[in-house]
């Protein structure tokens, strides 16, 4: 899975901590090539075998052995000397005879002997944890390769210095060899290690791991989670954090804090969006955590067979389309989505051209987008205070790759523009959606001059705000007025597409209907919906005719359910039946709104998704505004989908 997907999966995994950073990081390892003296098990040769067998039956002098075997005394003398060196024979000076040792008896049983031999062996020592690992099965990278890939690397721990003969652990080395033998990995030398002859070569390599960084804003403490691909590398738990704090390994891309007030976009714009986004994001996180708790609790496995999980998932997808704060792991996914789905143009405005965003994969996606004749406007600023920094080198490298794309036939659709210094970050896909934000600083403990740069981005589908931002960008980037051609993605026959909402209700619930309509006012002001109910009939109007006409053209029909609604023949038998017919024919969307406690589960619409959340009637909510807000957000999600469908059909 992609690192953004990994970050999304574990975003809420540490209670009380927020995910503030994630990245692929190059961890250092020491590659060690050794010359070892090892006891190797080899077959017993014929002469040695007969000598041991003769000594066992008390033919224990060189002359007697030589006479029986018919071999020269000198050869027997050399053979017995070797057997003594390998601790298979012992010579008794008092009797001038040989005796079998315990090892000699064992050798005779196995017809094998242990002899010392020089063997060569290569392995890795993790420069953070000190763990020994085999060469086979791991994809390690050279320092040059890591630099070319522009992957952030960390320093080795002082607790795991460059290996020398005296620092190699016999026990760790023997444990590694046994583990490799058990798993059948590579050509593993067998036997016991007698000594390390020499270290033939030591050099540094890197392995790419994924690091998620969590921060508790109250205690100002960090936690790290490390992954090898998609699997937890738990051997780094605690060790990495301690080493980073004590030794400054460089896990976090800490920079000198630059407090600048260079805001190029309207602060009124970002303030309005931020206030709305904060409310929606709190609701989104609350529902995501509820879903996570529900699905992780094995005792609640039964819920997978009910509507509750599906309702929560639907609410999450709906809230993701509202104006909300983006989590760090979402931005890359949304950028890729914009390059895949945009039909006319994509605007990308960034403070810097950095390789962690504009990597080869994203540049390939930009290239593919241009091939579809979709324009890409890339607008960037450069901080003049960092002319000699690593940022300038990365910017130069990325611009060279972008110029290579511009030289292609479809490169004419790529527009690159440098502007003044900025901290804003903007992404706009046609006029379908926009992300807008800037940076803030998370100051490092003990060093007030450095910090971690945090992004704060807002996602919105608010067309008015998108158009205002485009107008400001045209001025900032000195583009010709109207150069960024707008598509009519929300226009039908020259007018803005608005979902028509019809209220079906009992007049005894008129007060609650009015409260709900108040909460829909922002949707009406943003021209996402228009509303109608029978109190809008002018004096002299024909009641039934106007109700029928508006019900006929409704896109969304709200059934305001209470005991009085169920008791009303007109609501139940006429309006509800027509609403369900339109819903069945996909002519409209029917949404039951449970106002007061009643037996609505027995009604024909009980199979539809009821609001507010979990079908909990509005009157039972401690704060009625919370209930109506939940309803309004769900209606907005449905309306946006309807408006997009309308515009596509008329395009």
Image: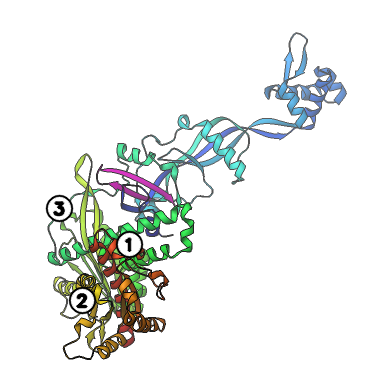
Q: Which residues are magenta?
A: 211-229
Q: How is the image coloured?
A: rainbow
Q: Which residue is mark 1?
A: 330
Between the C-alphas of marks 2 and 3, the distance is 40 Å
**x and y, in percent, of residue 489 in the image:** 27, 81
Q: Is residue 325 left or right of residue 12?
A: left
Q: Is residue 472 above or below residue 309?
A: below
> Around disc 2, counting alpha carbons within 10 Å, would you say few (fewer than 14), some (14 to 19), or many (20 or more)?
some
Residue 222 included in the magenta stretch of the image: yes
Mark 2 highlights which residue? 524
Residue sitting at x 40%, y 40%? 128
Q: Is tag 1's residue or tag 3's residue first in the polypeptide sequence?
A: 3
Q: From the viewer's perspective, tell me whether residue 477 is left or right of residue 123.
A: left
Q: Is residue 132 visible?
A: yes
> Which of the marked residues, 2 or 3, is nearer the chain's N terminus?
3
Q: CA distance from mark 2 to mark 1?
A: 29 Å
Q: Secondary structure at mark 1?
A: helix
- Residue 651, position as x, y percentages in the image: 31, 87
């Amino acid at each position: 899975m992609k690192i953004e997907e990994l970050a999304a999966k574990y975003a809420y995994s540490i209670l009380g901590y927020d995910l503030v950073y994630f990245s692929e990081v190059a961890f250092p390892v020491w590659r060690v090539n050794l010359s070892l003296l090892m006891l190797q098990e080899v077959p017993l040769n014929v002469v040695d075998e007969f000598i041991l067998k003769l000594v066992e039956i008390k033919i224990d002098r060189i002359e007697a052995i030589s006479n029986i075997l018919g071999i020269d005394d000198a050869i027997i003398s050399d053979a017995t000397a070797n057997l003594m060196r390998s601790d298979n024979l012992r010579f008794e000076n008092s009797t001038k005879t040989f005796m079998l040792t315990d090892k000699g008896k064992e050798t005779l049983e196995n017809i094998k002997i242990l002899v010392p031999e020089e063997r060569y062996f290569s392995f890795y020592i993790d420069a953070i944890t000190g763990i020994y690992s085999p060469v086979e099965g791991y994809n390690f990278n050279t320092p040059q390769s890591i630099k070319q890939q522009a992957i952030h690397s960390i320093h080795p721990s002082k607790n795991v210095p460059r290996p020398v003969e005296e620092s190699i652990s016999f026990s760790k080395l023997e444990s590694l060899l046994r583990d490799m033998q058990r798993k059948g990995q590579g050509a593993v030398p067998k036997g016991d290690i007698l000594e390390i002859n020499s270290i033939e070569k030591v050099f540094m390599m890197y392995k790419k791991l994924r690091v998620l960084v969590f921060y508790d804003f109250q205690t100002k403490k960090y936690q790290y989670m490390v992954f090898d691909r998609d699997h937890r590398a738990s051997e780094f738990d605690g060790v990495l954090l301690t080493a980073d704090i004590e030794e400054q390994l460089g896990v976090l891309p800490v920079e000198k804090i630059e407090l600048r007030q260079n805001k190029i976009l309207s602060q009124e714009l970002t303030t309005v969006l931020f206030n709305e986004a904060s409310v929606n994001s709190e609701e989104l996180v609350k529902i995501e955590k509820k879903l996570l708790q529900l699905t992780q609790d094995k005792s609640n496995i039964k819920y997978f067979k009910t509507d509750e999980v599906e309702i929560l998932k639907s609410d999450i997808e709906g809230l993701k389309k509202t104006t909300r704060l983006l989590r760090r792991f979402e931005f890359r996914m949304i950028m890729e989505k914009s390059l895949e789905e945009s039909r006319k143009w994509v605007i990308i405005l960034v403070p810097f051209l950095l390789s962690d965003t504009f990597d080869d994969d994203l540049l390939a996606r930009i290239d593919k987008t241009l091939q579809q004749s979709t324009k890409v406007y890339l607008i960037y600023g450069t901080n003049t205070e960092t002319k000699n920094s690593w940022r300038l080198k990365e910017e130069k490298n990325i611009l060279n790759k972008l110029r290579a794309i511009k030289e292609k036939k479809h490169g004419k659709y790529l527009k690159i523009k440098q502007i003044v210094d900025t901290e804003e970050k903007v992404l706009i896909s046609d006029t379908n959606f926009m992300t807008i934000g800037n940076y803030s600083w998370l100051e490092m403990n003990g060093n007030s001059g450095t910090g971690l740069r945090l992004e704060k981005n807002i996602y919105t589908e608010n067309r008015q705000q998108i158009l205002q931002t485009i107008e400001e960008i045209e001025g900032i980037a000195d583009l010709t007025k109207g150069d960024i051609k707008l598509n009519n993605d929300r226009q039908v026959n020259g007018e803005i597409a608005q979902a028509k909402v019809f209220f079906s209700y009992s007049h005894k619930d008129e007060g609650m209907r009015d409260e709900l309509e108040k909460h829909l006012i922002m949707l009406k002001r943003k021209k996402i919906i228009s509303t109608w109910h029978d109190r809008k009939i002018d004096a002299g109007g024909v009641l039934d005719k106007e109700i029928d006409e508006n019900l006929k053209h409704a896109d969304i029909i709200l059934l305001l359910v209470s005991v009085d609604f169920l008791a009303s023949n007109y609501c139940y038998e006429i309006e509800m039946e027509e609403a369900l017919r339109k819903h069945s024919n996909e002519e409209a969307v029917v949404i039951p709104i449970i106002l007061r406690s009643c037996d609505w589960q027995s009604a024909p619409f009980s199979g539809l998704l009821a609001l507010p959340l979990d079908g909990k009637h509005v009157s039972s909510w401690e704060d009625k505004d919370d209930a109506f807000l939940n309803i309004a957000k769900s209606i907005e999600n449905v309306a946006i989908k309807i408006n997009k469908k309308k515009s596509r059909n008329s395009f």
